[in-house]
Amino acid sequence: MNSTHAWQALAKELTDALWLGAWFLYGGLVACGACWCVGYGGARAWEEWDHDWVRRREQRRIDREAARGLRAIEEFLQRQIPASSNALDGEELPSAAKGHRRRRRQP
């Protein structure tokens, strides 16, 4: 066997090994990038779900507190204002107290 032929075979094997290593490195980078993207997307979705859950819980708490406050105000006003003075003595309520209704035009 000729020594140049041996060096050519060795160079071919070394080139193949380098290409194989480069492809493994490239494939590893692609796999890491894909895992990072999926992990980041999953973490972002979890964060959004968790944030929505906290927001819904806080909204329920706020609604309960508002209802409790309104009940307390109603009870306070009922104690402060006697039942007989709630009605205006024969007077008609002002239009703002009746509720706003838009009149339809008659053709």
Image (spheres, grey):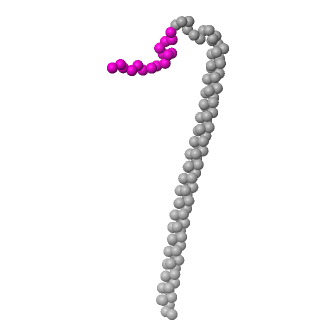
- Image point (54%, 6%), residue name: 90
- Image point (54%, 53%), residue name: 41
Q: Nearer the viewer, residue 107 or 15?
A: 107
Is 66 within the magenta?
no
The relative height of residue 26 versus residue 44 in the rendered view (above or below) is below
- Image point (52%, 79%), residue name: 14
**Magenta residues, dominant SS class:** loop
Residue 106, x across and y down, in percent: 35, 19
- The span picked out in magenta is 92-107
| Count of numbered tags | 0
- Image point (49%, 12%), residue name: 94
Picture quadrant where residue 102 is located: top left
Residue found at the far left of this picture: 107
Residue 72, x across and y down, in percent: 65, 21
Q: Nearer the viewer, residue 83 or 5?
A: 83
The relative height of residue 67 versus residue 49 in the rendered view (above or below) is above
Picture quadrant where residue 83 is located: top right
Is 96 within the magenta?
yes
Picture quadrant where residue 58 is located: top right
Q: Nearer the viewer, residue 65 or 100?
A: 100
Residue 20, x across and y down, in percent: 52, 74
The relative height of residue 2 versus residue 44 in the rendered view (above or below) is below
